[in-house]
Image (cartoon, rainbow, N blue to C red):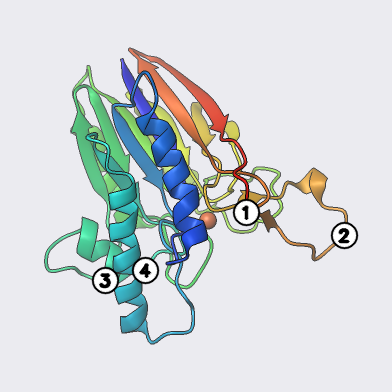
Amino acid sequence: MVVIAHLSDPHLDGSPEALSRLTQVADHLRGLAIRPDVVIVSGDLTQSAGSLPPADETVLAAQNLESLLAALSMDVPVFCCPGNTDDRMAFASRFGLSPPIPGPVHQVHRLGQLVIILLDVTVPGHGYGQVTDSILAWLARQLDALSGDERAVLVMHQPPTPLYHAAVDGLFLRSSEALEAIITRHEQIVAVLCGHTHAALTTTFAGKPLVIAPGIRSAGVLLQEIREPGSPLTTDDVPPGYAMHVLQENHFSSQFRTLAQRSR
Ligand SMILES: [Fe+2]
């Protein structure tokens, strides 16, 4: 059995508010009677200031990445994929090749029989994600290398299908048909994990569970909650939360927890 804590969208920007919401989740995980075996963060780890020269934005993002890893330190591995608000150079410097190259950073990690494949589907400067031939080729190599008794989860920021979601349905993963075909062909993939919506959501993709963790920094407003066009699409009135996934042989289940509202 493997227990996965799935966090998403902490958007660390140097503000105490953002760090406090992430710390609340981390403290909760540390206090659990049964700790997770691994922590996955599905993107939007950091949030740029948006007004600084690119090199300064990278420095700031690198500092915020270190804050994230320090906050999540709990003697279990922490694996991260980037989201649309992450700085590609800062992410590559921390998690990619050395010296960093300003391209996408894909990762694969093994934890016993569990293989965690983190895809970088981000497009710098855009909120949507994009499946490319090079992503498909890299993924196919990882999947072809799986042994028969390994089980894989695929992690990426942007969901590959519309979700009846106000903010994200125009910014989901584009050109996902070929990705769907690859996932369909590989029985060892037990689930696809995403972020981006800032709301807990589940559906299926390529016949697998597609599970999206709630946002840590803020909550996404859902379509049925919008009363007026142009009203805000996120709110920080909702406290942070996370998903907990349990893999037992071929059985994959997900639980969701929203933490208590802290007094301000
Ligand atoms: Fe986000």
Residue type of the residue flagged with mark 4: Asp
Mark sitting earlier along the chain (1/2) = 1
Q: Amino acid at mark 1?
A: Val
Which of discs 1 and 4 lies nearer the camera? The answer is 4
Mark positioned earlier in the residue sequence (2 or 3) = 3
Residue placed at 28% from the left, 59% from the top? 66
Q: Residues within 10 Å of mark 2 (few under 14, many from 20)?
A: few
Q: CA distance from mark 2 to mark 3?
A: 40 Å
Q: Secondary structure at mark 3?
A: loop
Mark 1 Cβ and ligand 1 under 8 Å apart: no
Which structural element holds mark 1? Answer: loop
Q: Dot 2 corresponds to which residue?
A: 228
Instruction: Give SS at disc 2.
Output: loop
Residue type at the position of mark 3? Pro
Q: Earlier in the sequence, mark 2 or mark 4?
A: 4
| Coordinates of residue 6 in the picture (x, y in percent) | 42, 36
Q: Which residue position is annotated with label 3?
A: 102
Indicate which label's residue lies in the foreground, 4 or 3: 4
Question: Which quadrant of the rendered structure holds the N terminus?
Answer: top left
